[in-house]
Amino acid sequence: MAFKVLALGGDGIGPEVVEASLKVLEVAAQSIGLAVDLSQDLLHGACWEKYGTFIRPKTLEKARNADALLVGAAGGPRWDHIVIDGGPEEQDGLMKLRHELDVFACIRHARAWDALIERTPFKPARVRGADVVVMRELCGGAMFTQSRGVESKADGSRRAYDLNEYGSDEIARFARVGLEVARRRKGRVVSVDKSNVFIAGKLWREMVEDVAKSEFSDVELTHLFADNAAYQLCCQPATFDVILPGKGSVQGTAIYEPVHGSAPDIAGQGIANPVGMILSMAMMLEYSAGAKECAKKIELAVDAALNAGFATKDIGGTHGTVEMTDAIILHFQSL
Ligand code: NAI
Ligand code: MG
């Protein structure tokens, strides 16, 4: 059966980087004989302009039936002020997708590329070798709570709140994914919380500890308070493996997207850096299509293209989105 991909470019540079990743996907899938059944649709602002909604029911249906989603970016000054009745998931097409598909675990991979090491804000000696996965919980906590609002008080002042709440099951299922990811990597997890201050943080630490002890005795777990974790990550990034902040093979439909936004300041200029999106697509091949070798080859091709001097403007180069993408494809084919 073909591997079903739903690609949603979204807004700003989103469609540009998604197009780049699809170009690489075509070559990569062909190289391993993977049949891809690709469909594309509009998301958020782009969807609002055409249909007056951030995501159509039809698109949600397609998403539920897909093996994986590729998403560019959602949002922009044209739509950021629009307020829809309902919870946080109604305000944003991407949040709606995460909510509907119950995509609660975000796996964010960051590494220090040798070719770019002099251009990072860090001292090269400190950052060299850094290869970190930062997990992010996507369906709970303050960012996604339904307990939110603004209240007007009798004295005319206002009070706004977003409740930082976590259920023990929510924490456990998220911890499980992080520990599983670590098991496939270097086997080390740093769980980050503010259990010295927050009650939700205490439950966080307790549940992560429980799951690790009972199901992942082979993974090394340590705990850090959030402020110290940020400090240690700056001082010795290369010592981290997986970070599980409280704030496996992927089961169900997963969404693959780069960390950046829609970059309205450079949209349409052909200069967006496609690497984040291309590596997100590679993660899709690894986690959702079971093609780990092929994903690794894409990462090596990015490394090779960077080492050969290809770079977009944001990372100190002069190459455009298409040139960068084609360089990655060329290196992929010669590996
Ligand atoms: P942003 O990530 O879009 O841009 C920040 C800066 O980084 C800009 O100068 C931009 O040109 C640059 N940049 C970002 N991605 C780049 C790329 N691939 N290549 C080259 N340069 C790149 O963040 P910003 O400006 O805070 O948000 C813009 C819009 O994007 C907002 O509407 C925001 O809500 C939305 N957004 C969406 C996200 C998502 O879809 N997951 C995540 C973050 C923001
Ligand atoms: Mg993102």
Image (cartoon, helix red, strand yellow):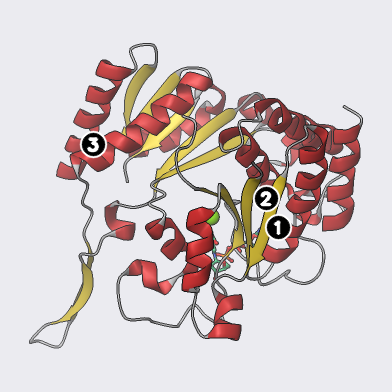
In the picture, measured across the screen, residue 49 lies left or right of residue 228, that is right
For marks 1 and 2, give the CA distance. Answer: 7 Å
Disc 2 element: helix
193 and 28: which one is in front? 28
Determine the image quadrant of residue 263: bottom right
Picture disc at residue 204: 3
Mark earlier in primary sequence (3, 2) = 3
Amino acid type at image mark 1 = Val
Which residue corresponds to the image point at 30% horizontal and 18% vertical from the top-left? 215
Amino acid type at image mark 3 = Trp
- Asked if labels 3 and 1 touch by Cβ distance under 8 angstroms, the answer is no
- The residue that disc 1 covers is 18
Q: Is residue 22 above or below residue 58?
A: above
Q: Is residue 176 above or below residue 18?
A: above
In the picture, measured across the screen, residue 209 lies left or right of residue 97, that is left
40 and 124: which one is in front? 40
Q: Is residue 318 above or below residue 90?
A: above
- Asked if labels 2 and 1 touch by Cβ distance under 8 angstroms, the answer is yes
